[in-house]
Image: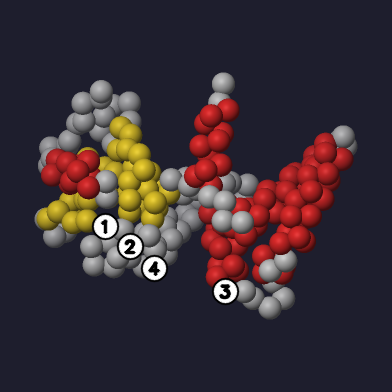
Amino acid sequence: MTELKFDEKGLIPVIVQDALTSEVLMMAYADREAYDKMLETRRTHFFSRSRQKLWMKGESSGHVQDIVSMQADCDGDCLLVRVRQTGVACHLERPSCFEEVLLGDLKGTSAILPELIRVIHDRKLNPKEGSYTSSLLSNEDRMLKKVVEEATEVALASKSADKRMQAWEVADLVYHLLVVLEGEDISLEQVYQMLWERRK
């Protein structure tokens, strides 16, 4: 096992990531006590550099982070903690602390997936008139037929040389699959477990 390397102040950076979507939620520091608390409670604990004390994420807001896994980097001087987030991670009431884009843009990255999952979940909890997603979630037969239809369109588009059309149809299928996952209460965690079983 890698020996952890705490810096001269006794701290190690901790990157917190959503276990289901891989979205980076926040970054904080842990001292040895916070690290030990994470191992003991399986909830994130950090050391506040401004308050100079140990704290548990969500101790006042209720937005706790249940630890799914913890990894050290190859040098042992940084931790990656995957969590199940209750509520939001950011103190500004945002899902992630990393919202501001300083360079480039997020188009063409996987950043759309957690956002899309949140929108679909919200449409289930708060149906919106005129929303295509809400209409699918309210009609199981239509929702399931759309997956069959989109899968067929992916297969047909794959025979074409038009890469944009292929990507369009795959995006349609991914979206409709996400709607089915939400509509049928199938967890991404279960899907990932099945994929691990098939990994060869």
Marks 1,2: beta carbons within 8 A: yes
Which SS class for mark 2? loop
Q: Which residue does the numbered mark 1 point to in the structure image? A: 57
Q: Is tag 1's residue or tag 3's residue first in the polypeptide sequence?
A: 1
Q: Which is more N-terminal, label 4 or label 3? A: 4
Q: Position of residue 96 (x, y in %)?
A: 42, 57
Image-based side of 35 in relation to 120, left or right: left
Residue at x 57% of width, y 74% of height: 126
Question: In the rendering, at what x and y percent does residue 154 appear?
Answer: 80, 42
The residue where tag 3 is placed is: 126
Q: Amino acid at mark 4?
A: Glu
- Can residue 92 be seen by looking at this rendering? yes
Q: Is residue 15 visible?
A: no
Dot 4: element: loop
Check whether the beta carbons of the residues at disc 3 and disc 4 lie within 8 A of each other.
Answer: no
First of labels 4, 1 by sequence position: 1
